[in-house]
Image (cartoon, rainbow, N blue to C red):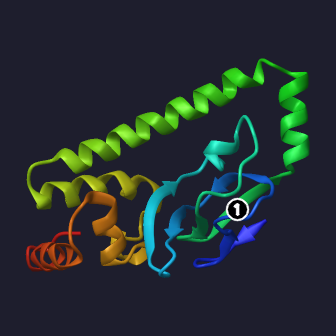
Amino acid sequence: MQLHKGEILFRQGESGPLFQLKSGMLKIVRVHEDGSEFLVNVIVPGETIPHHSLISPNPYYGTAVALIPCEVERIPSSEWYQQLEQNPERYRTIALQLQDKLRMMQQRIDQLTEISPADKLAQLQSWLHTFIQPASLTDILTQSEIGQLIGLRRETINRLLKIQTRQGGR
């Protein structure tokens, strides 16, 4: 299935199939009771989601939205869990997928623990560049979302991006 930028793959609280992202990039946002959204994850090619449902079914934790055009494979839940029952060695594959995601999250933690806000932004830009080039970070995420990913206020992101522009950066 093809998704265009901004299209929703699934919504928070719904239940349904799993998906494997073949190409593109998705964001996972949590919607709070007051309607505010918080970016909690970025999904890159090769990932099977939702991560928390790889071994047992659960409602979707957040809403998945295409950041750029995506190709996604739909995996019916019954088929996924039946294959797990019939082929216990698939649990190793799932463990390796979760290990890869954990390592990616460790990179995100490294971004958050950089001392200077400018370094945090540069780390995020460098990491995402491998997935979105030739687009830039601000082509796919709002300043608020960038701030949510690296623990900075939108105003700080705005100021840092202006400095980068003046310096001929990204």
Q: Is residue 162 left or right of residue 31?
A: left
Which residue is most to the front? 33
Above or below: residue 39 compared with residue 162:
above
Whether residue 120 is visible:
yes
* Residue drawn where x is 71% and y is 56% of the image: 59
- Give residue 149's position: percent from left, percent from top: 34, 60
* Residue drawn where x is 27% and y is 58% of the image: 150
* Residue drawn where x is 21% and y is 72% of the image: 153
- Give residue 34's position: percent from left, percent from top: 47, 81
Above or below: residue 91 compared with residue 109:
above
Q: Is residue 143 left or right of residue 81?
A: left
Residue tagged 1: 71
Amino acid residing under circle 1: Glu
Whether residue 125 is visible:
no
Above or below: residue 155 compared with residue 131:
below
- Residue 5: quadrant of the picture: bottom right
Number of other residues with Cα within 10 Å of mark 1, as a class: few under 14, some 14 to 19, many 20 or more: some
